[in-house]
Amino acid sequence: MIHNIDIKKTAIETLELEATAIQKLTQFIDDDFIKVVNQILDLPGRIIVTGIGKSAIIAQKIVATLNSTGTPAIFMHAADAVHGDLGIIQEYDLIIALSKSGNTPEIKVLVPFLKQTGNTLVAMVGNMNSFLAQHANFILNTSVEREACPNNLAPTTSTTAQLAMGDALAVCLQTCRQFSDRDFAKYHPGGALGKQLYLKVSDLSDNNGKPEVSPSASVREVLITITKYRLGATAVIDAGNIKGIITDGDIRRMLEKYEDVSHLTANDIMSQNPKEIKREELAADALHTMRQHNISQLLVTQEGHYEGIIHLQDLLKEGII
């Protein structure tokens, strides 16, 4: 074991080597790449992505990216394909085979069977003279000069190139399909990301109740209402119209300003022109507004009518923050 190597220098060299390799991939975005994108856009079937070894791992990630961006895809391990998994492939599917060398024994065994099915075969390969490249309908060139591995053996730069080419393919398909953030949300319903994309204000505010007082309400009534709903605020409503909001902060400022509050009403202490948000808006938009104005609550409305309150704590509980 060597302890005196320059770790920082080695790490930077690795990243620079891989970054250079990815940059050179731009030379390989050719007619074949464009034809593959167009074929997939018109494809009535799915994309089957296959590989062996480290390429198989990259193939699985490409499948995940395609599925999450609106292109149906299935992973098929090259070693398992000839032992029954070829049944995955249907008549209208397109096959993408990943391999650095294009000459591994598993690929050489698999390719003839793939050709027999009559499906379009796309080679994502680093060797243009390989068995895989020669038998493919289209080639996505992922050639690299060397691996980042000091021995030029362990797949490092080559798998990074495959991953980047897969991303380029997925993003082109996503862009051509005008796959929106709302579409993205359909495939990511779980976790904070999904909630940011689909959770609406009403999903949270409807659970909070609807605290409100009239402009003539006493300070005692205001305090009881704020305490009852535990939202740190109440709306001030007159004949169905929003007149203002009273928050915990307004109560503190009132106590600092007046020694005797018995004569005060909601109208005297409320903040006018409160920030509002429509109930059909995304909860993530509510968070943006709260941050923008440094506030903790928003009045929720529908067609101009008061519907309730959404609080910063609601967003915290859902993991949106």
Image (cartoon, helix red, strand yellow):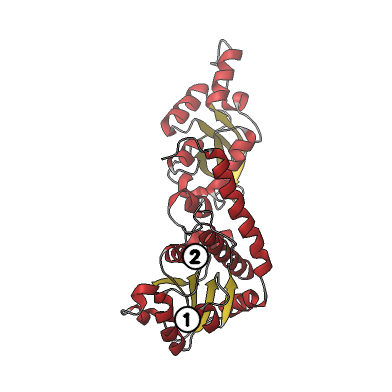
Farthest-out residue, left: 83
Residue 172 image offset from top left, x and y in percent: 62, 68
Q: Nearer the viewer, residue 188 or 78?
A: 78
Q: Nearer the viewer, residue 177 or 25?
A: 25
Task: Determine whether label 1 and label 2 are within 8 Å by CB.
Answer: no
Would residue 239 be found to the left or right of residue 114 on screen? Answer: right
Per the image, the residue denoted by label 1 is 93
Marking on residue 315: none
Q: In this view, does 221 lie above or below 170?
A: above
Residue 195 image offset from top left, x and y in percent: 48, 51
Compare marks 1 and 2 and give the one earlier in the sequence. 2
Would residue 21 be found to the left or right of residue 308 on screen? Answer: right
x 60%, y 75%: residue:
37
What crowding class fits label 2: few (fewer than 14 Cα within 10 Å), some (14-19), or many (20 or more)? many
Label 1 residue SS = loop
Residue 269 image offset from top left, x and y in percent: 60, 24
Residue 68 image offset from top left, x and y in percent: 49, 63
Label 2 residue SS = helix
Q: Which amino acid does label 1 sit on?
A: Asp
Per the image, the residue denoted by label 2 is 62
Q: In which quadrant is the N terminus drawn?
A: top left
x 55%, y 53%: residue:
280
x 47%, y 77%: residue:
46
Is residue 301 visible to the viewer in this orientation of the structure? no
Q: Which amino acid does label 2 sit on?
A: Ile
